[in-house]
Image: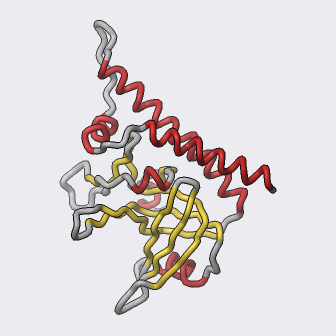
Amino acid sequence: MSQAELTREVARRVFASEFNDSTYTFKESDDERAPNYALLPTGDRANRVFAVGTLTETEDVGEDSEYWRGRVVDPTGTFFVYAGQYQPEAASVLRDTETPAYVSVVGKPRTYETEDGTVNVSVRPETISIVDEATRDRWVVETAERTLDRIEEFEAWQDDQEAPESGSTAPTNEYAQMARERYDSPVENYRRDVIEALENVEDVEATA
């Protein structure tokens, strides 16, 4: 195993609705090679993400060379995935896959600010793999669990900020603090997304 693989950041499981709201990025040191993180609104950081959904559309949006865009849909929204000459394997999957198809994507979050000031969030994929429906459903359940864990930690931290116990020091949660300062969306929104995502999987299983 290479040194790069040993130090590679864990890929966070995150639903599209939260991922697309993760418009603030930051580094934790001034080293130009320091990893870049997206700040998740539920109070965590993500250098890499792991998503599974339905690849519904692909398009070569490149001008001078191939640059593929894919739309990967989960029960809460859409991940936009872009791959070009520096991601040849991922680009070939987007080029060759007949849609719709279930896919898993591991990659890095990227932000782009438009002329009107809107910040769009996308994934630069390291890998894209064709998967089956059972894999998609399992990802939804596991991502729901991870999201709820983050929400509960955020809310526990928030409760301590608002009503700290007498004589105690409220626990620190620097990413929750950053999220509260940077974002307007209450974390309760993502709890609703979790419920809808799980209901979507149950509906699929009921009609199978």
Could you tell me which residue is drawn at 28 percent across and 7 percent down? 167
Q: How is the image coloured?
A: secondary structure
Left or right of 127 on screen, residue 121? left
Question: Total of numbered circles in the picture?
Answer: 0
From the viewer's perspective, is residue 94 above or below residue 65? Answer: above
Residue 65 is drawn in which quadrant?
Answer: bottom left
**Is 13 or 23 nearer to us in this picture?**
23
Residue 43 is drawn in which quadrant?
Answer: top left
Image coordinates of residue 25 in percent, x first then y, are 29, 54
Could you tell me which residue is drawn at 46 percent across and 63 percent down? 107
From the viewer's perspective, is residue 148 above or below residue 155? Answer: below
Residue 157 is drawn in which quadrant?
Answer: top left
Image coordinates of residue 163 in percent, x first then y, are 32, 15
Left or right of 192 on screen, residue 36? left
Image coordinates of residue 59 in percent, x first then y, are 49, 82
Could you tell me which residue is drawn at 26 percent across and 65 percent down? 113
Could you tell me which residue is drawn at 39 percent across and 86 percent down? 62
Q: Quadrant of the C terminus?
A: bottom right
**Is 194 or 95 nearer to us in this picture?**
194
**Farthest left residue in view:** 30
**Farthest right residue in view:** 208
**Is 83 or 133 nearer to us in this picture?**
133
Image coordinates of residue 104 in percent, x first then y, are 58, 63
**Farthest bottom residue in view:** 64
